Amino acid sequence: MSTHGATGRFQREELVGKYLTFALGNEEYSVPVLKVREIIKIMDITAVPQVPHYVKGVVNLRGKVIPVVDLRLKFGFPPQEYTERTCIIVVEVVLATGARMMGIIVDHVSEVLNVTAEEIEQTPEFGDEIQTDYMKGIAKVRGQVKILLDLDRVLGVDGTVSMPQPSAA
Amino acid sequence: MELPLATSGLAAVEEAEAVADIAETASPARTEPAAAAPVTEEDLTIDDAIELAVVQSDPELGNLFIAEALDHLGTIEAALLELDERPGDTGLLNDIFRPFHTVKGNASALGIVSVERVAHKVENLLDLARSGKIRVGAPEVDLVLRAVDVLTMMIGDVGHRLAGRPRTATGTEAVALVAQIALRIERQLAAAANRSDGSGLDFSELAAPVASEPLDAASATAARVSAGESDTSFDPSPLASATRRKDDLATATAIKVDTRKLDNLVDVVGELIVVQSLIQQDPALSSLVDGRLARNMAQLRRLTADLQRNSMALRMVPIRQAFQKVARVVRDISRKAGKPVDLVITGEDTELDRKMVEEITDPLMHMARNSVDHGVELPDARQAAGKPARATVSLSAYYQGSHVIIEVKDDGAGLNTERILESARRKGLIAADAAPAPEDIHRLIFEPGFSTAAQVTEVSGRGVGMDVVRRNIELLRGRVDIRTERGQGSMFLVRLPLTLAVLDGLLVRVGTERCVLPAAAVRESLRPLPEHVHFVQGHPRMVQVRESVLPLVSLGALLGMGGSALDPSSATVVVVEEGGSRIGLVVEELLHKQEVVVKSLGDSFASVRGVAGGAILGDGRIGLILDPHGIVAMVREGGRRAA
């Protein structure tokens, strides 16, 4: 379906650049470093009532109140105790209502990768069981597959944190 | 021009230009015949593509123009209200002319022709007045005030159109205004000519109502002007000016700052306070006994507290802006209702959070409208009651602790207790046999659904009741009371916190979380005796607090935060009052009172009910700030579902 250079909604060239990769279970995901504001150790999170279970609550980041989403739960992984390696990656996402800072909880942060055009692969068709619209594409680096996340979609369908749950892989 | 420190670039350039051609416009050669070139509606509704071309290419410039123009119009309005009291003051005329000229010049430079055309007409009138060719009285002030309204609307509309929204203002009002200004100039010039002819015409005759002129478009809006004609006075007002002129230097050293920058500063300072107290309470540090360290720590604490106070103060502005709008309303209504009123303003320099000043303006205007329309009697009735024919309405603001008190006071007839009681009984607001205390009767005017139908007039009876006023003030975490004495007048007493950024809170534990209840809504807290807790279907549902039985709700269960399935007789019940209804909330533990800095949770959590925001607590964690209004609403709905 895609012609040369395009992978899904994005041109291959748009996806080239530096990515921060992190792990959820055995899978490797990545977000553009330009989106990342900082990485903090998991900290005390204040629960907020009446929100989806993957929204863990809010934290205080130097005087700012930041919502935090557990990406494991969001993607339908089984919950896991937070460890020493658990991190909150603070990202800036663009929602329908404007840019805002949000935190995502990941198992651990891996590395910063420079993804070249050759390493970018088309997003395969997985069928109905897996939602692919929050993937920008896939990069195959040193034989390993990294999923390039579209954070604006992951964290903000309709500008709220209550979004349809993707079906479990 | 010298250093344009306070003014932005746009204004500075225009200011220089204004000074340059003030002399020019003042010369008689430039004074165009008043009736020439009538402005039509088409002239004022020019297609966006043409009129907004320049500002669309540079929206920054457009927004700058709008902000500055609205600022100038505010200044002009204030000066006009003073001019109303001292019509002969040429200095004031200059103060009005200059910003008008700047607005016109800027509009012209940016190609916003409709604004320029209207402003130009008004400028003509002002220029003639400045050069003494026409005299200024109440009708002229009225016209220019209307022009300020029309231009404010038009300029606001430019903002709407820039944002891609459709035009809301039509040119009708502006066309009527321009026509009236032209007419006024013509009449005044004729009068001046007659005076110099020595024909001895009585001036008051010339000031005949403009409304009777056959001006279709104008007649609808001319009523206000004609009402003003009747007490046209050319004597400088002997009354002490209530709105005293402010030192212009005060504004010259001010700078404009984006509020987001201020918020960032406040955020960081708030965090600094937390870190400072964390260090201070650090066990490793407190075990050290060192005089120098203790002294330095104390000094650090003082400085951070000082820094916090100062950064909070950055958001504060004088309440003057709100008072100005009230002054305008009082003036308009007193004319319309034929009730001469002296407005006395005090404490207009009292500072409040900028947002508070904006939010309190409407309620204040409504209360002042009520005072003049319902409170103040007609001059005959006043004299019959042995009071001066001119009524006095006073508006004052002052500090009381960490609150600001605003009073709106009139020396009118006062509330009619019997009529309110009768009306409330008829509407079923109270039981037919109830006999409340007078203060409770007076508070009934704040109840939803209470409207004294006998008093509905064009001015006050527009469906916005005092219940809305109370609601808006409660949203600002304030309180409104009324004091009244029959025949002596009434006084609305508004009590507001200085800022919405800081909240007086009561810290409670709900489930495993700590939450903040606004102290203003908390009436009391208690450990009820077992026999005072009433069960319905096996669940504790009601609690008896002295004489009254209140609904009892577990806060944790209500919000979905877990916990609180406790036996309320061993837990703590906090009684919360909101909008006149009281409920008992069961919490795990009552911690302590604390002043907290209010943070928004952001629109991600906009749909969460019962939570108003977040506060950063002493240990750096966030505590949710609860919203009593939302909680009471949730309890009510829950009750309906259960029923």
Image (cartoon, coloured by chain):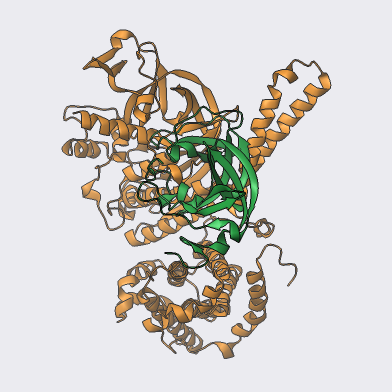
The chain coloured green carries which letter? A
Q: Give the residue drawn at x 71%, y 63%.
A: B5
**Quadrant of image for the N terminus of chain A:** bottom left
Location of residue A122 with respect to B348 vertically, above or below: below
Q: Nearer the viewer, residue B328 or B488?
A: B328
Quadrant of residue B166 within the rendered picture: bottom left
**Is residue B380 something that shows in the picture?**
yes
Give residue B38's quadrant in the image: bottom left
- Residue B595 place in picture, x, y as percent: 55, 30
Viewer-closest of B110 and A160: A160
Spot occupied by residue B300 in the image (x, y as percentages of width and height): 74, 31
Residue most toward the front?
A143
In the image, what residue occupies the spot 67% across and 71% down? B12
- The orange-tinted chain is B
Residue pictured at 48% horizontal, 44% vertical: B602
The x, y position of residue B493, in whole percent, is 43, 39
The residue under the point 48% across, 25% down is B513
